[in-house]
């Protein structure tokens, strides 16, 4: 028999004391008495069988990280468990041949309100996109520009075929409509689908097809624009108030920044939870049991939450198909790309499989090794029945039509990401402000609880913790 020590804070009533601070009750964890008191007997080479903590958070995506951040702000001990080998969940970046490849095209909008509270933007070294887009339509490119940031570009594009002059005026009106409403009003307003809203506002079919489908369709992975008008208004407002950006070190810099501020021994990676017990405990794939004194927060993707909580969740409406995407990366010589601008290209032609693409190194040169350009191409849907090499060939053929074969032919394919579960389906009816409390000691968070955005995930994590703190009378009801 060997002695295995647990370097984890043990939380039990004798170790906990409650003190008043700034009119709030705070949990103070007294230091463990000695390591031997935290020991368990275990046979050789077997994992420790039991751990105990204050709160267990399952899932270290943005929702779980935000929950952990809120717990840390109250000095409540917790363990953040994730099945994967790093934090971030869907927000990950891989380093491949000196390139930074985000696992699917993602943009960070600086106006996300919860993100503003949680993240250090300077440290993220955010690199901006051009506020507008270049749209491929009728065999050529047309610019759409944000009139507030690029007034003269916007003026010149007033009469382009992407929409009518009235459409451009309606965009300005939509901007005002969303800016005068609070986020809470927007997220709980009466809802219809985005496409119905656009038609109701009076946008022409031309601008719906040539701009809104590829642009918002690219954000929601939904070219049909069935996604709720609530989410359209929320994202439209954030776009009006902020910039589209990428962190210089890749999109994963966002979760990594949150994780870096947490106690180093509070995150357990490669720790898949396989079952949830009745008393806020979880069993890991390794066989280990982890129990919590204050509660359990489930911060995994919705389908996984449904599996883990089978029998504990109210029967759910039939799941609508999740949103999927494919992202292909290519490397190129800087002379083999057509622009140096940090601009997003959209497919407004209504033909082909490419939805949007951009030259990532034009936005953030750090996305590639020196002297190389990184091309990122996004498709909507999973194209399950098409082999990777056929998909690559089709994309190269299509983009050769956009930029010329001489330009695109020499691009070297780097990697293809197929993301089956990119976002939950958020077509009406939706509830973007779901109650995180499943029962005393059991809470849910994740983008499906709020909105399928970075911000929605962050909000959901904080709300789950606040529900737990209220239940434990640690913050006012
Ligand atoms: C390709 C792509 C592009 C996107 N683009 C944007 C964008 O531009 N802007 C935007 O705002 N949003 C975007 N999103 C949406 C956004 O990334 C998500 O809404 C958000 O990151 C979801 O965070 P989450 O914490 O709710 O879930 P997740 O990130 O999915 O985290 C769940 C975590 O739970 C872990 N887990 C699962 N099961 C278990 C288990 N049994 N045991 C332990 N751990 C488990 C997973 O490993 C994962 O780390 C995009 C998403 C994708 C995929």
Image (spheres, grey):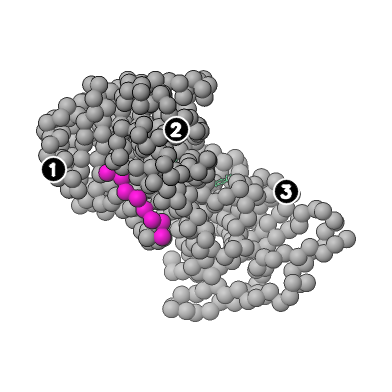
Q: Quadrant of residue 409?
A: top left
* Along the line of sight, the residue nearer the viewer: 460 or 38: 38
Where residue 34 appears, x then y in whole percent? 73, 75
Residue found 20% across the figure and 40% down from its top: 145
269 or 395, which is in the foreground?
A: 395
Residue placed under numbered mark 1 in the picture: 152
Is 167 left or right of 227, judged from the image as shown?
A: left
Q: Which mark is residue 203?
A: none
Find the distance from the CA under tag 3 to the CA under tag 2: 39 Å
Circles 3, 2 touching at the beta carbon (< 8 Å): no
Q: Specify the label residue 286 is tagged with.
A: 3
**Which mark is in front, 2 or 1?**
2
Tell which residue pokes out farthest to the right in this image.
Answer: 1
Q: Say what secondary structure mark 1 lies in.
A: helix
Residue holding disc 2: 330
Q: Are marks 2 and 1 in contact (CB under 8 Å)?
A: no
From the viewer's perspective, is 187 left or right of 105? left
**Based on the displayed image, in which of its 4 quarters is residue 442 positioned?**
bottom right
Identify which residue is drawn at 59% across, 77% down: 17
Q: Secondary structure under badge 2?
A: strand
Answer above or below: position of 474 versus 322: below
Q: Say few, some or many: other residues with alpha carbon within 10 Å of mark 2 (under 14 / 14 to 19 / 20 or more).
A: many
Q: Which residues are magenta?
A: 123-130
Badge 1 density bin: few <14, some 14–19, many ≥20, Cα 10 Å: few
Looking at the figure, which quarter contains the C terminus?
A: bottom left
Residue 97 in picture, x, y percent from top left: 52, 40
Quadrant holding the N terminus: bottom right
């Amino acid at each position: 028999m060997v002695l295995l020590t647990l370097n984890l804070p043990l939380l039990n009533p004798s170790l906990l004391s409650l003190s008043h601070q700034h009119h709030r009750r705070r949990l103070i964890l007294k230091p463990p008495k000695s390591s031997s008191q935290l020991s368990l007997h275990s046979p050789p080479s077997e994992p420790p069988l039991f751990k105990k903590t204050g709160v267990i958070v399952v899932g270290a995506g943005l929702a779980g990280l935000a929950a952990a951040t809120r717990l840390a702000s109250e000095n409540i001990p917790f363990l953040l468990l994730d099945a994967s080998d790093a934090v971030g969940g869907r927000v990950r970046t891989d380093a491949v041949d000196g390139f930074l490849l985000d696992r699917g095209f993602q943009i960070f909008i600086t106006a996300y309100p919860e993100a503003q509270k949680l993240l250090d933007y300077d440290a993220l070294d955010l690199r901006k996109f051009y506020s507008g887009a270049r749209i491929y339509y009728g065999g050529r490119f047309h610019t759409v520009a944000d009139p507030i940031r690029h007034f003269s570009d916007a003026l010149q594009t007033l009469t382009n075929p992407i929409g009518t002059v009235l459409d451009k005026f309606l965009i300005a009106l939509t901007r005002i409509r969303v800016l005068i409403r609070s986020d809470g009003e927007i997220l709980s307003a009466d809802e219809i689908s985005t496409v119905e809203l656009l038609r109701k506002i009076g946008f022409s079919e031309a601008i719906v097809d040539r701009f809104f489908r590829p642009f918002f369709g690219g954000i929601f992975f939904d070219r049909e624009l069935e996604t709720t008008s609530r989410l359209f208004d929320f994202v439209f407002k954030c776009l009006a108030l902020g910039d589209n950006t990428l962190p210089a070190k890749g999109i994963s810099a966002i979760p990594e920044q949150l994780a870096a501020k947490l106690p180093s021994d509070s995150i357990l990676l490669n720790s898949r939870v396989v079952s949830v017990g009745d008393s806020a405990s979880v069993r890991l794939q390794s066989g280990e049991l982890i129990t919590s004194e204050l509660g359990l927060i489930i911060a995994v993707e919705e389908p996984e939450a449904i599996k883990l909580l089978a029998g504990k969740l109210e029967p759910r409406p039939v799941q609508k198909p999740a949103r999927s995407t494919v992202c292909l990366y290519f490397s190129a010589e800087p002379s083999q790309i057509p622009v140096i601008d940090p601009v997003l290209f959209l497919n407004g032609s209504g033909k082909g499989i490419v939805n949007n693409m951009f030259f990532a190194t034009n936005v953030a040169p750090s996305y590639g090794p020196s002297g190389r350009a990184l091309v990122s191409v996004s498709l909507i849907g999973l194209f399950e029945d098409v082999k990777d090499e056929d998909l690559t060939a089709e994309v190269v053929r299509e983009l050769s039509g956009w930029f010329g074969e001489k330009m695109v032919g020499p691009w070297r394919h780097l990697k293809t990401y197929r993301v089956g579960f990119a976002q939950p389906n958020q077509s009406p009816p939706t509830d973007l402000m779901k109650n995180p409390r499943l029962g005393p000691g059991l809470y849910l968070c994740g983008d499906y609880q709020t909105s399928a955005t970075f911000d929605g995930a962050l909000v959901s994590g904080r709300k789950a913790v606040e529900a737990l703190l209220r239940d434990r009378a640690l913050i006012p009801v």
